[in-house]
Image (tube, grey):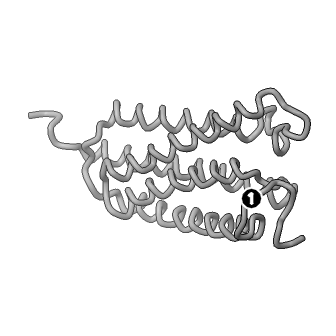
């Protein structure tokens, strides 16, 4: 019966899509790190949570490539996408009417601040996963094509390096106490 067995084309398209999402998130996280280190944009605690949620989406996707196609891996990525949306909407709503001393943290990129970008990124991620499921379905053949697996491993190593740098940065910024946006606690 046609349509019952997952096609190799659907599996390849699924893996290519997930690799593209991983690459875009790696670029976004890289841009955030460049803004932090090159331009002195100290991330606020909610910004750090948004980064953690983006890393969570990446790890769900990386798990897909490591363990094979499963709805569980994509479910992890989607759950972190929802977390990203919740945190970003909260921060956007907190800062929608700037109060003295509580304006948006950081400078605008293309006219939008990080929390607003994060809302757009989260909505785009969740819509992309929904469209992928609608078009390709959940039943894709396990086992990605070797070039895609190689690219995912390379990109995964880069994401892990970004995560490690971010973790060290957070420890330097926050120490073992509550995080703040006034500078780096351990360097002051």
Q: Give the tally of numbered discs.
A: 1
Query: Could you tell whether 153 is left or right of 121 in the image?
Result: left
Q: Secondary structure at mark 1?
A: loop
Percent x, y of residue 175: 74, 69
Q: Nearer the viewer, residue 49 or 69?
A: 49
Residue under the point 86% across and 72% down: 187
Residue neighbourhood size for the residue with mark 1, other residues' Cα within 10 Å, grouped as few (<14), some (14–19), many (≥20): some
Extreme-top residue of the structure: 97
Residue under the point 62% across and 33% down: 120
Percent x, y of residue 3: 17, 34
Extreme-front residue of the structure: 177
Extreme-left residue of the structure: 1
The answer to which image quadrant residue 150 occupies is bottom left
The answer to which image quadrant residue 37 occupies is bottom right
Residue under the point 48% across and 61% down: 151
Q: Is residue 112 above or below residue 75?
A: above
Query: Could you tell whether 8 is left or right of 50 in the image?
Result: left
Percent x, y of residue 83: 53, 43
Which quadrant of the figure contains the C terminus? bottom right
The answer to which image quadrant residue 134 occupies is top left
Residue under the point 51% across and 43% down: 81
State the residue position of label 1: 179
Which quadrant of the figure contains the N terminus? top left
Percent x, y of residue 159: 58, 62
């Amino acid at each position: 019966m046609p349509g019952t067995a997952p096609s190799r084309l659907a599996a390849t398209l699924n893996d290519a899509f997930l690799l593209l999402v991983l690459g875009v998130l790696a670029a976004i996280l890289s841009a955030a790190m460049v803004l932090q280190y090159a331009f002195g944009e100290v991330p606020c605690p909610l910004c750090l949570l948004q980064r953690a949620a983006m890393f969570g989406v990446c790890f769900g996707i990386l798990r897909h490539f490591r363990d094979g196609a499963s709805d569980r891996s994509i479910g992890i990525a989607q759950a972190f996408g929802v977390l990203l949306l919740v945190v970003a909407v909260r921060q956007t709503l907190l800062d929608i009417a700037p109060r003295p001393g509580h304006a948006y943290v950081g400078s605008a990129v293309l006219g939008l601040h990080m929390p607003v970008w994060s809302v757009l990124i989260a909505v785009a991620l969740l819509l992309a996963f929904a469209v992928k499921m609608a078009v390709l379905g959940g039943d894709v053949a396990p086992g990605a094509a070797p070039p895609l697996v190689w690219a995912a491993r390379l990109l995964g190593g880069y994401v892990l390096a970004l995560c490690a740098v971010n973790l060290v940065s957070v420890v330097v910024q926050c120490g073992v106490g509550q995080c703040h946006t006034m500078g780096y606690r351990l360097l002051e």
